[in-house]
Image (cartoon, rainbow, N blue to C red):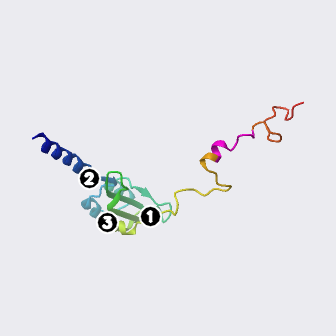
Amino acid sequence: MRFPLLIAAAMAVAASACAPLRSHQGYVVDADLLNAVQPGVDTRQSVLATLGQPSFASQFNQGDWYYVSRDSRNYAFNTPKVREQVTVQISFDQSGNVSTIRKWGAEQVASISPAKRTTPTLGRERGFFADLFGNIGTVGAAGAGGGGAGGTRP
């Protein structure tokens, strides 16, 4: 009688470990507020009052504003996978009025995968034991320095 109950409990624990972890990062997009911003009508101040602070602002192109929203999911210890991403770019003209509004998804995101997870350095490669035992015999050797303040001993 207890054995089937223990098996059912173990299966429930195992199944809960496989539940996806969902997360949201960035701006919470409200379609009604976003549709309220109109090119040629709104200014920087009205966009700030309607949508709030942008996720980041461009340093070029008269300071375009970007609102980024990302929903991701992952299982246990795996790398999170992007489920949905919305990026809204609001461009301003010289006088600070909204000129264009662009919206795109995750298809514009570049996936970068480095070739190696190490940083190349100059010099020779040494292993663990070479680092551990490499200085044996060099302490106090002639010409190796370490002779005190005067450099040589009488």
For disc 1, the marked residue is 95
x and y, in percent, of residue 22 in the image: 28, 53
x 84%, y 35%: residue: 151
The one nearer the camera, 39 or 80, is: 80
Side of 58 relative to 130 (left or right): left
Q: Which mark is residue 118?
A: none
Nearer the observer: mark 1 or 2; the answer is 2
Judged from the image, the secondary structure of the residue bearing numbered disc 3 is loop
Give the residue type that dot 1 points to. Answer: Ser
For disc 3, the marked residue is 38
x 38%, y 53%: residue: 53
The one nearer the camera, 139 or 21, is: 139
Side of 8 relative to 93 (left or right): left
Give the residue type that dot 3 points to. Answer: Gln
Side of 112 relative to 74 (left or right): right
Q: Where on the picture, by quarter, is residue 86?
A: bottom left
Q: Is residue 105 above or below residue 120?
A: below
Judged from the image, the secondary structure of the residue bearing numbered disc 1 is loop
Callouts 1 and 3 close, C-beta under 8 Å: no
The stretch in magenta equals 130-138
Q: Is residue 146 above or below residue 15?
A: above
x 87%, y 31%: residue: 153
**Magenta span has 134?**
yes
Placement of the C terminus among the 4 image quadrants = top right
Please rate how many residues cluster around mark 3, counting C-alpha atoms within 10 Å: few if below 14, some from 14 to 19, many from 20: some
Q: CA distance from mark 3 to mark 2?
A: 44 Å
Placement of the N terminus among the 4 image quadrants = top left
The one nearer the camera, 49 or 16, is: 16
For disc 2, the marked residue is 18
